[in-house]
Image (spheres, grey):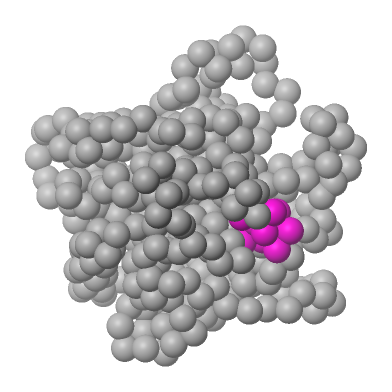
């Protein structure tokens, strides 16, 4: 479940076919795979420092974040800086990340979420949960679209370890194989894993330990939870989420039976997504204009849609706010990014 990149692969900016097949197999059967050392130490150091600075600013407000209110104290979904030099091509256009994404999700997969995931000292246990529902709810639904049962994931989560993530600093608890437990496919938003101890007992938990500068690729249907960080320092991690090309909702949800006229528009304009109100609109992530040169310097070798647009002064992105909203940050004018 841990894979290393050879020098030959680094020169080619791609992963050997046999190795990629093994990575994809682990993700589909076990629920995750780790590819080691595919982000430079320099970029990881830069991002770690910026995240810790932002954690301090958030904590100075004296308020719990929205994510803490939902999932538990000490677990921050912290928006990442959307301006240079922090919006790095190594993170947003990384050829090895995109190679695995394309291998799992197919051509034209798109980036839908990019944020920080921070586990602070003295954090709590989160409720056991999974991040994404099944895109198909029954064997019959899956068969209509030519999919097997259990069906494959239509979303891939990428956890980027800026520093080594271990039990000692609160590595996430995961339940390998649980993404194949189809019992949850028809659950409503009110169902909770903690209310089904017999189901949970069928899987043995472990920890999602990730070497520094490495990426854990995870099926987001796999059960997991944040746990207390026993160290004295916040543990910073980056979370990037990609979706299959046929998932046309901006949140990466698979919508069946889209009207032919709307599908034609969606297929002809990759910036369009279905919005929460059912209308079509721009579903791209927003970044400051000063990141454009770096983020557009190289086309995707693996056909991944970066799904990014840029805002120019006097507009800029306040990364502290609206990390879970469309665009991934709040557009402001003539102001500095602030958590308040």
- x, y (%) of residue 225? 58, 72
Identified at 9% across, 40% down, the residue is 334
- Image quadrant holding the C terminus, namely bottom left
Which residue lies at the image location 27% right of the left edge and 37% below the top edge? 295
Q: Is residue 225 above or below residue 239?
A: below
Residue at the spot x=58%, y=12% of the render? 264
Rendering coords of residue 181 (x, y %)? 80, 61
Q: Quadrant of residue 193?
A: bottom right
Q: Closer to the camera, 328 or 304?
A: 304
Q: Is residue 205 left or right of residue 81?
A: right
User: Relative to 124, is 334 on the left or the right?
Assistant: left
Name the foreground residue: 320 vs 17.
Answer: 17
Closest to the observer, 101 or 246: 101
The quadrant of the picture occupied by the N terminus is bottom right
241 sits left or right of 143 in the view: left
* Residue 231 found in image quarter: bottom left
Q: Residue furthest right?
A: 140
Front position in the image: 3 or 297: 3
Residue 12 visible to an observer of this rendering: yes
Residue plotted at (61% across, 61% down): 32
Specify the quadrant of the image occupied by residue 47.
bottom left
Q: Is residue 57 magenta?
A: no
- Magenta portion: prevailing SS class: helix
- Kindly give the residue lying farthest to the front in the view shown: 8
Q: Is residue 197 visible?
A: no
Tell me where residue 319 appears, x and y as whole percent: 27, 51
The number of discs equals 0
Residue 44 drawn at (x, y percent) = 28, 63
Magenta range is 23-32
12 is higher (above) or lower (below) than 76: above
């Amino acid at each position: 479940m841990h894979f290393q990149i050879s020098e030959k692969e680094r020169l080619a900016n791609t992963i050997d076919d046999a190795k990629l097949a093994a990575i994809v197999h682990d993700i589909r059967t076990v629920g995750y795979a780790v590819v080691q050392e595919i982000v430079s130490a320099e970029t990881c150091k830069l991002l770690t420092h910026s995240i810790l600075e932002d954690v301090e600013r958030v904590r100075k407000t004296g308020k719990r974040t929205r994510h803490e209110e939902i999932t538990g104290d000490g677990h921050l979904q912290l928006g990442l800086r959307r301006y240079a030099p922090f919006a790095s091509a190594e993170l947003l256009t990384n050829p090895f990340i995109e190679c695995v994404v394309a291998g799992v999700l197919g051509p034209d997969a798109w980036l839908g979420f990019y944020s920080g995931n921070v586990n602070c000292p003295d954090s709590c246990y989160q409720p056991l949960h999974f991040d994404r529902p099944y895109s198909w709810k029954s064997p019959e639904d899956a068969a209509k679209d030519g999919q097997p049962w259990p069906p494959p994931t239509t979303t891939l989560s990428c956890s980027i370890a800026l520093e080594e993530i271990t039990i000692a600093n609160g590595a996430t608890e995961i339940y390998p194989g649980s993404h194949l437990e189809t019992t949850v496919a028809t659950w409503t938003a009110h169902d909770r894993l903690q209310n089904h101890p017999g189901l949970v007992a069928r899987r043995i938990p472990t920890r999602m330990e990730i070497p520094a500068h490495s990426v854990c690729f995870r099926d987001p249907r796999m059960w997991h939870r944040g746990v207390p960080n026993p160290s004295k320092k916040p543990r910073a991690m980056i979370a990037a989420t990609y979706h299959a090309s046929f998932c046309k909702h901006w949140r990466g949800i698979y919508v069946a039976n889209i009207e032919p006229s709307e599908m034609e528009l969606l297929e002809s304009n990759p910036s369009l997504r279905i919005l929460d109100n059912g209308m079509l609109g721009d579903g791209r992530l927003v970044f400051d204009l000063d990141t454009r040169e770096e983020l557009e310097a190289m086309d995707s070798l693996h056909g991944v849609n970066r799904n990014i647009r840029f805002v120019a002064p006097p507009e800029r992105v306040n990364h502290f706010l609206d990390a879970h909203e469309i665009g991934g940050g709040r557009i402001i004018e003539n102001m500095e990014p602030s958590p308040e």
